[in-house]
């Protein structure tokens, strides 16, 4: 696998408060990630996981707190500015444009490239990294399976040559075989490409199996933060917050 990055990023989130209208979805959340690691963000529905990713990537404005990527303040930057700084966000829902071909979807991912990689070079890298997409480049994205669509949206995000990847529920709605394939892909992006990943995932068991670190959110607050191994071994934590 050809590395898409040479300088994986470290993220810091300090005492961030954010929400929608009068509802605070994040209440003083602080997290940090190390370069070239996977950090799993876990918790029940409504815990604030998706809002955390949207706030980091600029789609929700924090009311208080600070967000930085390798010391560069991103707190109130616009989403396109944050993307150019090297952060790519793959939201929940396999958001391919079904009317476009696989290649047309990929090309859209190169609009906010970080660094100096050309779109043509990024496209060639995508086809080398994901042979499945190379063989389907002229197919309508609407004909892909759920797992294939998830691979496409991750590949589209990598077209921007990011230093850090935010993934929101990449296993949602997938068959168990495809869940394993997608999780293995995420692990490879860390191990072989040196990418830093912040992974929101309802499937806590699968996420912790590939993650280095993990945090658990509950009602907008961090209730646990530790190594993935320690979180997976904590029977009480699993029982109350992780569902396995």
Image (cartoon, grey):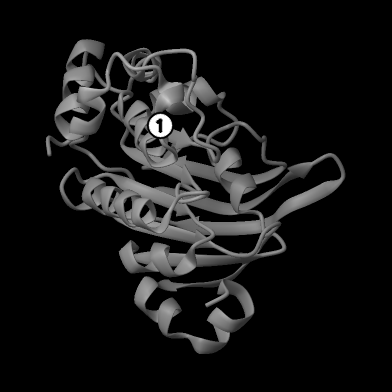
Residue 126 % position (x, y)? 22, 26
- Left or right: 78 with respect to 175? right
> Up-down: is 50 above or below 3?
below
**Residue reaching furthest to the bottom:** 235
> Up-down: is 111 above or below 135?
above
Q: Residue at x 33, y 17 (%)?
A: 139
Residue 114 % position (x, y)? 32, 23
Res. 155 image quadrant: top left
- Left or right: 2 with respect to 34? left
Q: Residues within 10 Å of mark 1 (few under 14, many from 20)?
A: many
Residue 104 % position (x, y)? 37, 12
Q: Residue at x 45, y 47 (%)?
A: 170
- Left or right: 44 with respect to 97? right
Q: Nearer the viewer, residue 147 or 238?
A: 147
**Residue reaching furthest to the front:** 143
**Which quarter of the rendering shows the N terminus?**
top left
Residue 207 in view here: yes
Q: Nearer the viewer, residue 104 or 189?
A: 104
Q: Residue at x 35, y 37 (%)?
A: 151
Marker count (numbered):
1
Q: Which residue is mark 1?
A: 153
Q: Residue at x 61, y 74 (%)?
A: 241
Residue 88 % position (x, y)? 41, 33
Residue 34 in view here: no
- Left or right: 40 with respect to 55? left
Report helix, strand or loop for mark 1. helix
Q: Nearer the viewer, residue 77 or 71?
A: 77
């Amino acid at each position: 696998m050809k590395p898409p990055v040479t300088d994986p990023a470290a993220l810091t989130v300090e005492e961030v408060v954010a929400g929608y209208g009068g509802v605070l979805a994040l209440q003083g959340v602080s997290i940090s990630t190390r370069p070239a690691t996977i950090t799993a963000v876990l918790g029940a529905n409504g815990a604030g996981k998706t809002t955390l990713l949207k706030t980091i990537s600029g789609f929700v404005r924090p009311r208080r707190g600070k967000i930085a990527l390798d010391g560069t303040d991103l707190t109130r930057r616009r989403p396109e500015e944050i993307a150019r700084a090297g952060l790519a966000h793959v939201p929940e829902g396999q958001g391919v444009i079904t009317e476009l071909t696989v290649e047309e979807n990929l090309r859209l991912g190169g609009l906010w490239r970080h660094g100096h990689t050309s779109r043509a070079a990024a496209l060639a890298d995508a086809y080398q990294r994901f042979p499945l997409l190379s063989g389907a480049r002229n197919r309508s994205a609407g004909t892909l399976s759920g797992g294939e669509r998830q691979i496409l949206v991750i590949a589209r995000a990598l077209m921007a040559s990011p230093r850090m990847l935010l993934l929101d529920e990449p296993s949602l709605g997938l068959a168990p075989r495809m869940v394993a394939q997608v999780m293995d892909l995420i692990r490879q992006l860390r191990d072989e490409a040196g990418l830093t990943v912040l992974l929101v995932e309802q499937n806590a068991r699968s996420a912790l199996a590939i993650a280095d670190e993990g945090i658990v959110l509950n009602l907008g607050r961090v209730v646990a933060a530790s190594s993935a191994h320690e979180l997976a071994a904590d029977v009480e934590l699993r029982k109350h917050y992780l569902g396995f």
